[in-house]
Amino acid sequence: MVTGARREKKFDPFRSLTVFSTSVILVFILLPLVEMVLQPSIDSLQETIRDKDVLRAIWLSVYASGLAALISFVFGTPFAFLLARKAFFGKRFVESVVDLPVMIPHPVVGIAILSLAGREHWLGRFSSSWACHFTSMRQKPGSKRFRSVWRRCRAAWEHR
C-alpha cells in the first residue's frame, strides 16, 4: 500500500471551457459594476445627490417598488397558498400563466403593454380620455415632450 502517492491530473477540455466561460460572464457582469462604483468622484456624487430631479427619481423608485411589494404581498400570498395547497380545475393552466412572465423577454412585455396603451385599444382610449398618451415610443424620459405628457397625466389625475 503506497501512501502519499500523487495522482496524475489529466487535462480536461470541458472543465477548461467551463472555467473560461464562467470567467468571461463574471467579467461582463462585474466590470460595469466596479466601473460604476469607482468612476464618479466625491464632488460629482455630492452634486448629483443635491439635484431635485435625482431625489425625485430615487423617491419614485422607492415608492413604486414598495407599492409593488405591498400589492404582491396582499394579493400574491393568498394566491400562492391557493396554488400550493388546493386542487382545482384549471390549476395547471393558472400555474403556466403565472410562470409565463419569467420566460418572456422584457422588451416583448414592453411592446405588449405599449400595444395595450395604444389608441386602438380600449385601455389606450380610456387613458386618452384622462389626457394621458403613452403611444409615442420616441419619447425619452428627459425630453420636453415626455415631461409635458407626464405633467398632463399628473394634472388629469389630480383634478379627478
Image (cartoon, helix red, strand yellow):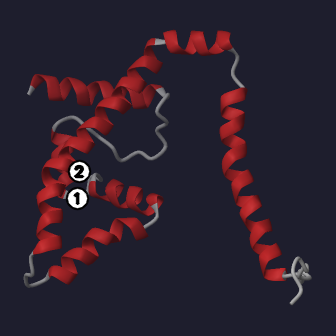
Q: Residue at horizontal 13%, vertical 48%?
A: 74
Q: Residue 32, how many percent across, how many down?
A: 69, 42
Residues 111 and 128: in front is 111
Pointer 2 with pointer 1, Cβ within 8 A: yes
Residues 2 and 126: in front is 2
Residue 76, disc: none
Residues 49 and 118: in front is 49
Q: Residue at horizontal 42%, vertical 18%?
A: 55
Can you see residue 149? Answer: no
8 displayed left or right of 48: right
Residues 159 and 48: in front is 48
Residue 61 falls in which quadrant of the image? top left
Does 53 appear above or below 74?
above
- Secondary structure, mark 2, is helix
Residue behind mark 1: 121
Q: Amino acid at mark 1?
A: His
Q: Residue 22, how many percent across, how many down?
A: 72, 64
Does 83 appear above or below 114?
below
Residue 113 falls in which quadrant of the image? bottom left
108 displayed left or right of 93: right
Quadrant in which the C terminus is drawn: top left
Does 61 appear above or below 22?
above
Q: Residue furthest front?
A: 1
Does 59 appear above or below 95?
above
